[in-house]
Image (cartoon, rainbow, N blue to C red):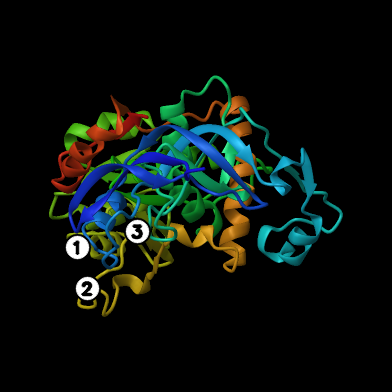
Amino acid sequence: MSERTQRALVIAATGKTKIITSKAYPRVSPNEVIIKVKAVTLNPTDWMHLDAYMGPLAPDTSLGSDFAGDVVELGAEAQNKARCWLTFVLNISCILTYNSNMDVIFQGFKVGDGVAGFTRGGALDKDNGSFQEYIKMRTEHIWHKPSSLPYEDASSMGGIALSTAAYSLIYLLGLPKPWEPRPENVAPILIWAGSTSVGLYAISLAKLCDDRIPVITTASPHSFDLVKSRGADVVFDYKDPEVSQKIKDWAKEQGYAEGILKGLDCISSHGSTTLATEAMGGGMLNVLLMVSPEEGKSWPNGVDVSFVVIYSVLDPKNEKAFASVYEWNQQLPTLITEKNFGNSNPLEVSNGLENIPDGLERLRAGKVSGSKLAYII
């Protein structure tokens, strides 16, 4: 019997793609499921992988990160309706702040379940990017899609943008978890580049964590209404030469004597990290791209700048990161259905693998702002 194959958008050469029909159908491992991809969404990292920003990838390597689809095959462990993770959680209780009496139950999957998540294109497995008909995933890395949520929205919400925002804000910067009791006090947060995909999610998520949190962001004037609609309390024009000082002045006027101590730079380029640290009074700023050695020699105001690598959550060896995304994936469906947490990113929806290269080029050229590109597969 001949090996089963599928259609996939893959690397033809650095910077170039092609569609092939000979990509191998995935083989499922015990704790994995195979998913029929129904929708994907694009991220800057997709064209960066294509253009070898992280090093060259071999021809015929799969591309794509975000996806949503239906489970069509399960490994032996994934067939369990529920699996107790008590031992696992007890081993890392100091990380997730669970107490020793809490039973943590893993909800299993069945054929036909709608799910969403993200992978790292072909960088981890050359045959397992999301821009193809079928993908395999560990059960910890996917979540149950509510039936009312369209696949394209699920792809966006299950993708690296919201996952980055959640990992950064909740697990690294320490914003209150929206499924736990509210704290007594809150502090402001700076979301630099609020109209980006990560930025829009970060604004919405900060308000979901606690609607008392003052959210300060930057954007172009034409995006002011968009970021305010997601919950931003005050918006500054990032092109204003005095933007950093104006943010510092705002914090002082609001009575925050120490200034803003938590921030996320959602663009992390063209000097944005320096501007963001200049606007803060200290504390920690998370960035999405590694800064240049020249820019990173020293940071204003003693701000601790930390590079967020969302792909680290995919590796079980990174216990803290792995456990964080597992918990987030368990909670996200309930946040959607019970707390009305929705897709913060306006979508431009197209059809077919064959149209994805045009979207990658638009992202590469900086021609996408205030929206996210989605494709029905």
Dot 2 falls on a residue whose secondary structure is loop
Identify the residue shown where x is 63% and y is 32%.
Answer: 334
Give the CA distance from mark 3 to mark 2.
15 Å
Which residue reaches farthest bottom? 297
Coordinates of residue 280 in the picture (x, y in percent): 34, 61
Front position in the image: 87 or 113: 113
Whether residues under marks 3 and 1 lie with C-beta atoms below 8 angstroms apart, the answer is: no
The numbered mark at residue 295 is 2
Whether residues under marks 1 and 2 lie with C-beta atoms below 8 angstroms apart, the answer is: yes
Give the CA distance from mark 1 to mark 2.
8 Å
For residue 76, say whether it is visible.
yes
Going by the numbered disc 3, the residue's amino acid type is Leu
Label 1 sits on residue? 271
The numbered mark at residue 288 is 3
Q: Residues within 10 Å of mark 1 (few under 14, many from 20)?
A: few
Left or right of 208: which side holds 330? right
